[in-house]
Image: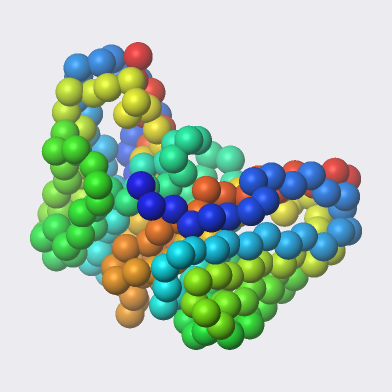
Amino acid sequence: GQQLNQSPQSMFIQEGEDVSMNCTSSSIFNTWLWYKQDPGEGPVLLIALYKAGELTSNGRLTAQFGITRKDSFLNISASIPSDVGIYFCAGLRGNKLVFGAGTILRVKS
Amino acid sequence: KAGVTQTPRYLIKTRGQQVTLSCSPISGHRSVSWYQQTPGQGLQFLFEYFSETQRNKGNFPGRFSGRQFSNSRSEMNVSTLELGDSALYLCASFGGTGQETQYFGPGTRLLVL
């Protein structure tokens, strides 16, 4: 099925470091979303972006909606051990969400 | 407010059997979407129900079906199970202005042997 191109696939970083991940698509989306999934749980919405160029923060998380509406990035500042998990980007087209394959984040304490 | 609940949480079936999964959305939410999550394919959209009607459908074979009841609870059925149907099945509900307020349940992990 169609997916967004999300990178990197996985990251192994030092606690306190900043993290950056991104998603690209060949198609335009009107809404970009970022989710985090912990083991054994469903994805939890972190940030929603509704306008091209929009930059939104949620605590240590910052995400931007690309001006071409074909990409988005997520930054996590000063990572901590509880940031581990899988991060998904998702684009909204109509009433359907299209997901990236996920970025696995592992933090070394 | 209680979150999205899914039952059962874990299930083991054998090839050829059928399975029914259940999802109870957040109280007041009328839309329920189902997704299949596998390591190889990520999260794939199955279908969406709103007010007991299927509003959207993904690219899955007819063995995958669903329905929604008048209380917004939804069930998903997979008939003639195949090994490749082993996955985490996620249900999400929303009741806001759009899909962006979609909340996921913990999922049902299905293993087909």
Quadrant in which residue A95 is drawn: bottom left
Tell me the residue at 40%/59% (across/down): A98
Query: Dividing the picture into quarters, in which one does residue A96 lie?
Result: bottom left
Residue A78, image x, y percentages: 84, 63
From where the camera sits, is residue A3 visible?
A: yes
Location of residue A56 with respect to B66 vertically, above or below: below
Counting labels gives 0
Coloring scheme of the render? rainbow
Whether residue B72 sits left or right of residue A77 in the image: it is left
Left or right: A52, with A96 as reference point:
right
On screen, B80 above or below B89? above
In the picture, measured across the screen, residue A100 lies left or right of residue A81, that is left
Q: Residue furthest front?
A: A26
Residue B50: horizontal and vertical position, in percent?
Answer: 18, 64
Give the answer, above or below, for where A34 lies relative to A3. below
Residue at position x 57%, y 77% from top? A66
Give coordinates of residue B89: x percent, y percent.
36, 40
Q: Is residue B105 visible?
A: no
Residue B57: where, in percent of width, then height? Answer: 21, 54
Q: Residue at x 25, y 16 (%)?
A: B15
Q: Quadrant of the C terminus of chain A?
A: top right
Q: Which of B105/B64 is in front?
A: B64
**Is A45 situated left or right of B29 in this image?**
right
* Above or below B99: residue A105: above
